[in-house]
Image (cartoon, rainbow, N blue to C red):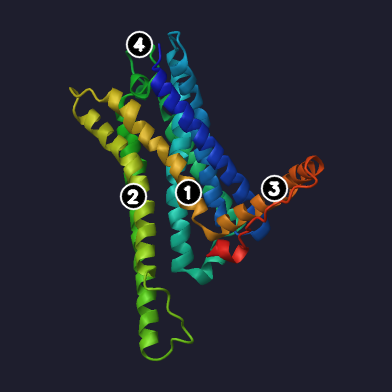
Amino acid sequence: MGDVAFGILLATLASLIMALNALMVIVLARLIWRSSYLGLCFVLNLAIADALVGFTITGLATEELSDAEHHIPQRYCALRMAFITCPCAASILTVMLVAFDRYLAIKHPFRYFQIMRSPVVGAFIGGLWLLACLIGFLPVIARSFQQENYQGSCTFFAVFQPTYLLTVLCVSFFPAFFVFVYFHCHLLKIASLQMQQIRELQQIGLASTYPVSPPSSDMKALRTVAISVGCFALSWSPFFIGSIVQVVCQRCILQHVLERYLWVLGVFNSLVNPLVYAYWQKEVRLQLYRMCRCMKSRVFPLFWTDSQARRPGRVVASVHVISLAQFEE
């Protein structure tokens, strides 16, 4: 019998992840089609990976909400866990790729569009998914990473050996995380140097030619870096650190905490990613605003005509409309 509360939590989380990332996929696809800016393809790939994370955990939510006890064969359980691990790995790796794309765009702005062409972007995304599939399906390919005394309860640590997770951590997660932090810290350094140069130009009388940004620009850059790094670190680090403790300490019994709490915290990052990497970009907000206006112009006239037919003598109050310039501010 599954845990109903845990099943409701997974079902709610999966629904929110799929809905929000599906919306971001539509917005980003339309924006890429209109602007032809290939850098947004990495953010689009992140939204697709996160949407797949939400889709794959729906099976776990259904099983938890079921009253019957299920004895799942080991091969089927290994495949299920592999399909869950693969988009999670793709989401984590795409976060690193987005950080690299921003680093390249700011560090080498004149060479960026010469480097990031369609074949290069396609190669990056294709190689990323190949690596994610290799990480996710490694225990299926190498049976030595699977547990020998599988009891039929389909959980991550029940079907996979701790050495598999330790291998994934040492080979992929920790090196990628350090690179991720390096890129964002370097971006913050570049932003600080640019602000310092602008202030120096202002002091020598070139303020009209080089307008100074608001005083809070450094704090905004620091806040962006802190939120980007902090959301990722707070989401996945507890799970991976706890997994290392479980591997090192054989007497420690942390599987329940890792699978019920810390792993869910990591999956929650797929719900935060659209807000951090998509909605905070001005172009994405403007595209979402245009889509809402288009939907309003197509849907609301139907209600307007119907209300006029039923209440011909009623005076309709004026509606305050936010302009595009106000929205951008």
Which kind of residue does numbered mark 4 sit on? Gln
Which kind of residue does numbered mark 1 sit on? Leu
Task: Name the residue rendered at 64%, 50% in the picture.
Answer: 292
Q: Are marks 2 and 1 in contact (CB under 8 Å)?
A: no
Say which residue label 4 marks. Answer: 151
- Tag 3 or tag 1, which sits nearer the N-term? 1
Say which residue label 3 marks. Answer: 295
Say which residue label 2 marks. Answer: 230
- Tag 3 or tag 4, which sits nearer the N-term? 4
Query: Label 4: few (<14), some or many (≥20) within 10 Å?
Result: few
Query: Label 3: few (<14), some or many (≥20) within 10 Å?
Result: few
**Left or right of 319 on screen, residue 83:** left
Give the mark toward the camera: 2 or 4.
2
Q: How far apart are marks 1 and 4 (CA)?
A: 40 Å
Secondary structure at badge 4 equals loop
Residue 126, compared with residue 60, is above or below; it is below
Which kind of residue does numbered mark 2 sit on? Gly
Give the quarter of the image for residue 169: top left
Give the mark toward the camera: 2 or 1.
1
Secondary structure at badge 2 equals helix
